Image (cartoon, coloured by chain):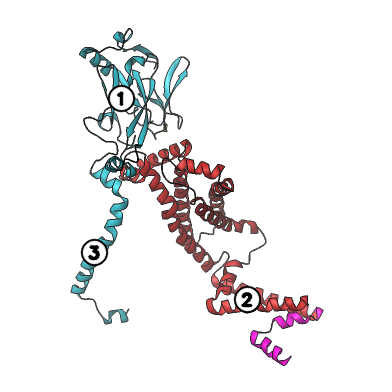
Amino acid sequence: MAELQKDPMTRGDFLGFGILGTIVGAILTIPPAAFVLAPIIDVDILGKSDVPEGPDDWFEVGPIAEITEEEPKFFKVDFPVEQIYAEPKVQEESGISKEEFVVESALWVSWRTEILGDGTYGQSYRPSFLDNYDGGTLTEEQVQEAQENLNVLSSSCAHLGCPVRWILREGEGELLCPCHGGIYNINGEYVAGPPPRDLYRYTHEVREDGKLYVRHEFDVGGENGPQEPYVI
Amino acid sequence: MIGRIRSQAIDTSRFLTDWMEHRTGIVTMMEHFLYEPVPKRGAWLYTLGSATLFCISLQFLTGILLLFYYVPTTDHAWDSIYYIMEEAYFGTLIRGIHYWSANFLLVFIGLHMAQVFFSGGYKAPRELNWVVGVVLLLLVIVLAFTGYLLRWDQDGFWASVVGMKIGSYSPFVGGATIHFLLGGDVTGPATLSRFFAIHVWLLPAALAPFIGIHLYLLRKHGVFGSEFEYSDRLAKLHERQRLELYESYEENGHEEIGETNLGRRNREERDRRE
Ligand code: FES
């Protein structure tokens, strides 16, 4: 100890070392940290998404007339993703990679159904005009009615994200998750198992051509249950 | 004739090991690393650590080989593994070893830990070695987790999604964790690249020094006693070996044994005399 004190550190030295150390440390750590943690900065702090968001980012799901009263219908939507090598500008200019990267998303779409006290299904709110719908243009009221009564559900379980599927049991159907047995009813509402909330719902729109459109946007947070997990 | 060639070969190898020993001390080091007096009872249990090390070495070697064909992009990852399995020479064998030794690695680690735990091997002064061992265990678990996604098949994909979402439930940093792993807010090409980087570079690079520390601490304290006791025992072992050698020399009157024990300089003198 005694030798160490031969050349004692003055207050100025200490400050100098401290400031220099901070600057050098920052120069050394900030670039690599920001480089690797970019997604946290983009998504958590700046609120960006890899799926383009904007007023025009509606994606066609399918004709609503195909959805029956008894069971949800399965649709697949490919949302384009802009992650590393899907940079749109490069793809456009090079003209080489036409292939866009997409997140293949599975949707269950059903008509709102009354749930009776014992959990069985009651009346379905499928609009009656669909019974003899010939593919023509819908009126504003019809669009409104259809839109209000549709459940547009993400197939990703609200627990840990496994894809749920429609299972028939004793005549009643349910959406069952294969991973840990989470169960939802036809409306996507939580029935049993580990999931902390109902299935996630897409922001959706029915248009006059009788088709359903969605955006990559969900009813997360707020009254609709916990925010977690953050990714659907 | 054959006897002469043999004695010459012995001389040469002795000369080479001596030469290396003087310059690097490697022989003593190898002795320290390879020889360990172990009680007869339950000796097999003490091989569990070596078994773990063996599996990890296999992972490193086969992993390097797999990298010659694996392509970490979403459109080629699965295809390239299919190629390894179907087309590449011995691809099935090499990927099979990587896969199975990964599984056995975790089994061995579990057994190794249990053995250390039940024999009280974590007690002073070996606590830090237990801590380092736990760090190694965690690194291996994350390695296993990240390796799973690289196959980019349904199995690995959904297992990784579930794993990442488990991480997303962690308090305060849940969102950051999953977005860091995903490389964004959806599973996509960035996810695969990140898992690849973590699996192939980050974790192996972190693993290697910890293995070094683990082995160093093991040798420092020995499995059954301190370094002091250990060298003590080693010295006794050498003493016994020497006595046995003399005994056999006296019994057989064998000359070569005596001669090979001459140093290099003595041998030269002898040759000059002849
Ligand atoms: S992921 Fe669906 S129940 Fe766990």
Disc 1 under 8 Å from ligand 1? The reply is no
Could you tell me which residue is drawn at 74 percent across and 79 percent down?
Answer: B257
Q: Which residue is mark 2?
A: B235
Q: How far is the residue under mark 2 from the one under mark 1?
A: 81 Å
The hue used for chain A is cyan
Q: Which residue is mark 3?
A: A22
Give the position of the C terminus of chain B as an image quadrant: bottom right
Chain coloured red: B
Q: Residue A110 in the image: x percent, y percent?
A: 35, 19
Disc 1 crowd rating (10 Å Cα; few below 14, some 14-19, many 20+) is: some
Give the position of the N terminus of chain B as an image quadrant: bottom right
Q: Which is nearer the eye, B18 or B217?
A: B18
Q: How far is the residue under mark 1 from the one under mark 3?
A: 53 Å
Inspect the image, locate mark 2, and give the three-letter code of the amino acid beneath it. Answer: Ala
State left or right for residue B192 relative to residue B59.
Answer: left
Residue found at the far left of this picture: A12
Q: Chain of mark 3?
A: A
Instruction: Indicate whether A59 appears above or below A43.
Output: above
Q: Which residues are magenta?
A: B251-274
Helix, strand or loop at label 1? It is strand
Disc 2 crowd rating (10 Å Cα; few below 14, some 14-19, many 20+) is: few
Q: Chain of mark 1?
A: A
Q: Nearer the viewer, mark 2 or mark 1?
A: 1
Could you tell me which residue is drawn at 72 percent across and 92 percent down?
Answer: B273
Ligand 1 lies in quarter = top left
Q: Residue B14 in the image: x percent, y percent?
A: 65, 77
Inspect the image, locate mark 1, and give the three-letter code of the amino acid beneath it. Answer: Glu
Inspect the image, locate mark 3, and give the three-letter code of the amino acid beneath it. Answer: Thr
Instruction: Indicate whether B54 appears above or below A59.
Output: below
Task: Please check the rendered image and state whether residue B266 is part of the magenta-colored stretch, yes or no.
Answer: yes
Task: Please check the rendered image and state whether residue B181 is part of the magenta-colored stretch, yes or no.
Answer: no
Helix, strand or loop at label 3? It is helix
